[in-house]
Image: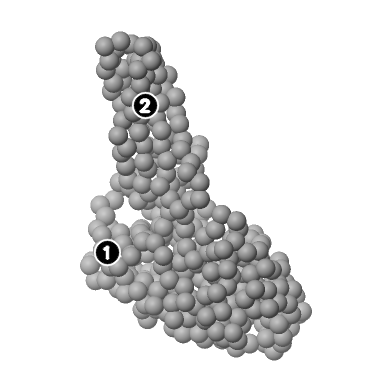
Amino acid sequence: MAISFILDAESDVDITDIRLHYKVLRYSFADVTGESYLQFEPATTVGVIWNWDMRRTGGLPPGTRVQYWWTVEDANGNRIETSLAILRFDDERFTWQNLTEGMVTLHWYEGEQSFADEVMLTIKDALDWLESDTGATLLEPVEIYLYADSQDLQGSMIFPQEWTGGVAYPRYGRIAIGINPGNLDWGKRALVHELTHLVAHQMTLSPYGGMPTWLDEGLATRSEGSLAYYYVNVLNQAIRDGSLISVQSISSPFSALSNLATLSYAESYTVVDYLITTYGKDKMLELLETFREGASYDGALKEVYGFDTSGLDQRWREYLSEPIGTITVGVVPGD
């Protein structure tokens, strides 16, 4: 996976220096420009090529735009700079179809128009439900790439995990996911999950910090609809055993151990559910906006709810003092 930049230059005197300047267009708080110095034999006519090998630097999601320009200098010290150009890093293995509604553009290559229409309806319903439940909305346009299966999806990534079925790229405003007409039921839930990640990150993007993992994953899992039975079973067992993970612990990335990760997702769902059902959507929106201002985890909770993470842990445990049945907060959008 690579991008090749090519330049042919000509001068009355020997060309002695050529540099490529480039930057990836994404949400960022710093203007970061890469520079590559091209090695060549000085001459009046020069052709150069520079390959960006992403196996060394990490990949880009499909549809990413890269801005670039060249500077060229000759032996007399004359220097010119080319006009800015933008290339779009697309996955050219497939012939993509496109559908745009509002701030969302959908790309797919397998399935009829009706398939794309159904997925778009799921997206619209999910965004409407998320706004009505939490106040969170898209702040920037997003593009969603529907791969026909996880193998095609993983082929677009650098060193992917074999279990990867969908991924959100919040800084790029992109989602890539393996959905086809045959797995649409799973696909809807997975897409809503990833879309919620993207919305939540847009709402909280800050150069000073971010939101706790329980909030990020809790919002995303809750947006899928009812808490799945396997999450309920694991959560109820932890309640009975007195082995719940603290809210402080699930503020950080979840454990790589599957049983602890499953419990962390289930707990995150219920922490978010507790906050929304107890204090309402306006407070949840205020919490997201407070994180966007750069508040710490404890600082944001204190400002919005009047208690810190330890206080949330205590109140949430009281909320879960009895084993729960299936928690229902709605239905999967589009169902």
**Mark 2 vs mark 1, CA separation in Å:** 37 Å
Horizontal and vertical percent for residue 309? Answer: 70, 72
Q: Residue at x 35, y 51 (%)?
A: 63
* Position above or below: 85 against 115: above
- Left or right: 252 in relation to 189: right
Q: Quadrant of residue 257?
A: bottom right
In the picture, the quarter occupied by the N terminus is top left
Of labels 2 and 1, earlier in sequence is 2
Residue 112 image position (x, y, % from top left): 23, 66
The image shows residue 58, relative to residue 176, as above or below, that is above
Q: Which amino acid does the dot numbered 2 rest on?
A: Thr
**Secondary structure of residue under mark 2:** strand
Going by the numbered disc 1, the residue's amino acid type is Thr
Q: Residue at x 42, y 44 (%)?
A: 24
Neighbours of disc 2 within 10 Å: few (<14), some (14-19), many (20+): some
| Residue 71: mark in rendering | 2
Q: Which mark is residue 307?
A: none
**Residue 223 visible in the current orientation:** yes
